[in-house]
Image (spheres, rainbow, N blue to C red):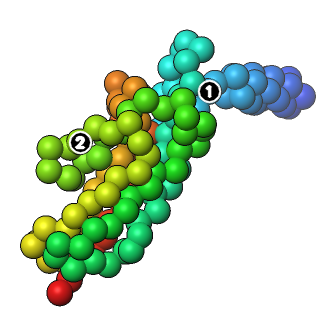
């Protein structure tokens, strides 16, 4: 029969090792650190303001991307779901609604960091109705 104290000591050592190992890993919710390993700032989009949130065909809506960092340092944004997937220098995009009625879905991302799997993208939607 095994010595219970030795078994408890071994289990405690194993749990302590695993806790220290897990604490030393960098996770971002995806299971890995998706931020760049260099000193460049990494920005993600934390919110998008859509105003108004319902438009008629031909009306204009304003999409404003809210980054988690200094908006002045971001060079380009990509607006996906809009014809041509335009890139803009501004975090604001003015969209003229076409004739397709219903809920329209879009995404915006920071172009500089698309190579990191698009983890910086934020989806949003607007309703087009008569």
- At a point 37% along the width and 74% down the height, the residue shown is 53
Q: Dot 2, crowdedness within 10 Å: few (<14), some or many (≥20)?
A: some
Q: Is residue 11 above or below residue 44?
A: above
Residue 107, numbered label: none
- At a point 60% along the width and 37% down the height, the residue shown is 70
Residue 98 x/y as whole percent: 13, 68
What element does badge 1 sit on? loop
Toward which corner of the image does residue 18 lie, by quadrant? Answer: top right
- At a point 41% along the width and 42% down the height, the residue shown is 90
Residue 99 as seen in the image, left or right of residue 11: left
Query: 108 and 73: which one is in front?
Result: 73
Residue 58 x/y as whole percent: 17, 72
Residue 123 x/y as whole percent: 36, 55
- At a point 27% along the width and 77% down the height, the residue shown is 55
| Residue that numbered label 1 is attached to | 26
| Residue that numbered label 2 is attached to | 86
């Amino acid at each position: 029969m095994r010595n219970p104290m030795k078994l408890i000591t071994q289990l405690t050592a194993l749990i302590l090792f695993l806790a220290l190992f897990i604490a030393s890993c960098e996770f971002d919710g995806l299971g890995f650190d998706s931020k760049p390993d260099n000193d460049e700032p990494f920005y993600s989009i934390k919110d998008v303001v859509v105003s108004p949130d319902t438009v008629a065909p031909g009306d204009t809506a304003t999409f404003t991307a809210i980054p988690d960092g200094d908006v002045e340092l971001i060079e380009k944004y990509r607006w996906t779901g809009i014809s041509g997937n335009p890139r803009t220098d501004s975090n604001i995009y003015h969209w003229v609604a076409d004739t397709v009625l219903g809920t329209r879905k879009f995404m915006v991302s920071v172009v500089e960091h698309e190579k990191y799997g698009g983890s910086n993208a934020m989806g949003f939607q607007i309703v087009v109705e008569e």
